[in-house]
Amino acid sequence: MPALVINGTLRSFDCDERTSLLDLLRNHAGLTGTKKGCDHGQCGACTVIVEGRRINSCLSLAVMHDGDEVTTIEGLGTATDLSPLQRAFVSHDAYQCGYCTPGQICSATAMIEEARMGWPSAVTDDVETSPELSDNEIRERMSGNLCRCAAYPNIVAAIRETAA
């Protein structure tokens, strides 16, 4: 019976120990913002933030996160109080069908923090200094989140604006 702090609220669940974190969030917690895309960890639609790190929730069992703090798209902002990144996605039209958008925003939120902490990526020129979030850096760091509509230029622009 996992107990998780989801979007700031401690919640306990009675579910099968084989339940993925994604299915727990959607089917047991009623948080349907996190999307099931491929269910194989290849698309990033299910990305959530666990203990400050972005993960594909479809690849993780809920019981593995007993006691962990989980942030979903619902925990980042509301319809009347959008997060800065959500506002940037709207202003840059960084979505089309919107299916990947929750995962994109959760991933980008954590990715911006990773860059602020100085974590290098595969394209970082100097791994001993904090990387500048150039378009190349953003594309590399977001490569695990796919957009079938190909809104990538707008997604990159929204992330760059927010990170600045």
Image: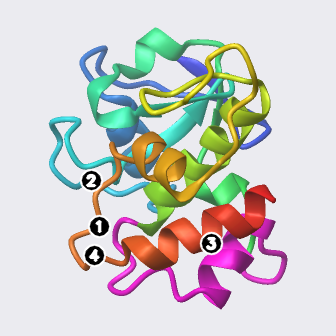
Q: For numbered disc 1, what is the local secondary structure?
A: loop
Q: Assess disc 1: are there few (<14), some (14-19) or many (≥20) residues with their C-alpha within 10 Å of its C-alpha.
A: many
Please give the residue where the numbered disc 2 appears in the rendered image. 36
Q: Residue furthest front?
A: 125
Give how far apart the Cα atoms at labels 2 and 3 are: 23 Å
Please give the residue where the numbered disc 3 appears in the rendered image. 158
Q: Which residues are magenta?
A: 79-100
Q: Is residue 62 left or right of residue 146?
A: right
Is 118 contained in the magenta span? no
Is 95 contained in the magenta span? yes
Q: Assess disc 4: are there few (<14), some (14-19) or many (≥20) residues with their C-alpha within 10 Å of its C-alpha.
A: few
Give how far apart the Cα atoms at labels 3 and 1 are: 14 Å
Q: Is residue 114 left or right of residue 98?
A: right
Please give the residue where the numbered disc 1 appears in the rendered image. 147
Give how far apart the Cα atoms at labels 2 and 1 are: 13 Å
Please give the residue where the numbered disc 4 appears in the rendered image. 150
Residue at left offset 40%, top offset 31%: 21
Amino acid marked by disc 1: Cys
Q: Quadrant of residue 67?
A: top right
